[in-house]
């Protein structure tokens, strides 16, 4: 057990004691905090099981490697679609996307496609979107996805165009 | 909320029909992920339960609610840009704030900047893309998030 864990566990313990004591001695602020915690937890528990099961199913049935193999780097409009699909199946945040972007670059994917991939892996990873739609509603997710994807593709084209002229290269990172 | 239950049930049924093996694997993955995220989740719920007690709903709504849209979007996109939070924590938090009356528009600004703009990941990003491109990408992303927030506002009728 690390030092950090010890702090967290003592914090949790202190929190539970505080809330329990507040209920026993009728200390209003503590009671309100406890009620907050309870109502938020209930909200979470209503949605979390579904979200996690959908994510589990997604991970079992769709793998990034298979998507990559079936699609291959395409050019033109389909290239952007491909970048978005690969991004959708990327697990983890931006820092996972950077090395993948570098390897796509070495395999010859265009800069604009790579920036699309980076942007898309920030905004349309499927597991995260499942979570989003569960808590914010599907309408919210659709508006956000459509708007941000179109803008990501547009700005990636601009950036790609500008940087290709300057013979820009992505670095291998550390 | 019901469509989520129906969708999950439907997906599970189709999956079981196709392969019982893979379905049980999926449920195991779901359980494992749930357990892995639980400590972070608990910390978030505890912190939020305290913070939302300390900051009265009135104050939250004054800055992030319906009557101060520009300030709300600015605040939300600032916090979204400078913090680092996995989506598994961020969206439940947004859900809680939504119930408190924070607008979709503000939450959209927050979650989109959180996902796209990385002030804290800047050092990592720089190693791959160099300083100038990293700054360009982040600035573009910030403006994309603002546009997304306004689109959300339009579609949820929060802008007027």
Image (cartoon, coloured by chain):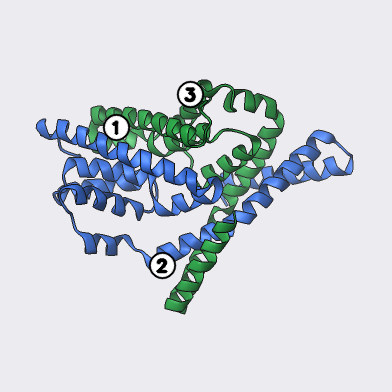
Chain colours: A blue, B green
- Residue on which disc 2 sits: A60
Q: Position of residue B11 (x, y in %)?
A: 48, 67
Q: Residues within 10 Å of mark 3 (few under 14, many from 20)?
A: some
The answer to the question of whether label 3 and label 1 lie on touching residues, with beta carbons closer than 8 A, is no
In the rendered image, residues at marks 3 and 1 fall on the same chain? yes
- Quadrant including the C terminus of chain A: top left
For the question of whether residue B31 can be seen, the reply is no
Q: Position of residue A78 (x, y in %)?
A: 20, 51
Q: Which mark is residue B137?
A: 1
Specify the quadrant of the image occupied by residue B19.
bottom left
Nearer the observer: mark 3 or 2; the answer is 3
Residue pictured at 51% horizontal, 68% vertical: B10
Q: Is residue B61 left or right of residue B127?
A: right
- In the structure shown, which secondary structural element does the residue marked by tag 2 occupy? helix
- In the structure shown, which secondary structural element does the residue marked by tag 1 occupy? helix
* Nearer the observer, A165 or B36: A165
Residue pictured at 23% horizontal, 44% vertical: A114
For the question of whether residue B14 can be seen, the reply is yes
Q: Residues within 10 Å of mark 1 (few under 14, many from 20)?
A: many
- Residue on which disc 3 sits: B74
Q: Is residue B107 left or right of residue A38?
A: left
């Amino acid at each position: 057990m690390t030092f950090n864990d010890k702090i967290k566990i003592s914090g949790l313990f202190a929190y539970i004691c505080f809330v329990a004591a507040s209920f026993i001695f009728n200390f209003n602020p503590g009671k309100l905090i406890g009620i907050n915690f309870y109502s938020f937890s209930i909200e979470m528990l209503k949605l979390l099981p579904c979200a996690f099961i959908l994510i589990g199913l997604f991970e079992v049935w769709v793998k990034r490697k298979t998507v990559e193999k079936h699609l291959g780097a395409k050019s033109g409009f389909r290239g952007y679609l491909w970048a978005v699909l690969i991004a959708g199946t990327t697990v983890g945040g931006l820092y996972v996307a950077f090395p993948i972007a570098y390897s796509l670059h070495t395999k010859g994917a265009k800069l604009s496609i790579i920036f699309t991939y980076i942007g898309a892996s920030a905004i349309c990873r499927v597991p995260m979107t499942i979570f989003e739609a569960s808590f914010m509603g599907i309408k919210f997710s659709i508006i956000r996805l459509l708007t941000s994807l179109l803008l990501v593709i547009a700005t990636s084209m601009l950036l790609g165009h500008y940087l290709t002229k300057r013979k820009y290269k992505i670095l291998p990172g550390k | 909320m019901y469509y989520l239950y129906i969708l999950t049930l439907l997906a599970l049924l189709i999956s079981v029909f196709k392969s019982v093996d893979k379905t049980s694997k999926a449920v195991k993955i779901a359980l494992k992920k749930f357990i892995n995220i639980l400590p972070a989740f608990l910390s978030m719920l505890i912190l939020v339960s305290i913070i939302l007690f300390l900051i009265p709903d009135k104050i939250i709504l004054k800055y992030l609610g319906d009557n101060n849209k520009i300030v709300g979007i600015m605040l939300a996109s600032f916090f979204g840009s400078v913090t680092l939070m996995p989506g598994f924590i961020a969206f439940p938090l947004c859900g809680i704030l939504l119930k408190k009356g924070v607008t979709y528009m503000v939450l959209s600004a927050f979650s989109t900047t959180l996902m796209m703009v990385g002030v804290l990941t800047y050092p990592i990003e720089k190693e791959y893309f160099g300083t100038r491109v990293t700054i360009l990408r982040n600035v573009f992303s910030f403006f994309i998030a603002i546009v997304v927030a306004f689109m959300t506002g339009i579609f949820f009728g929060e802008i007027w």
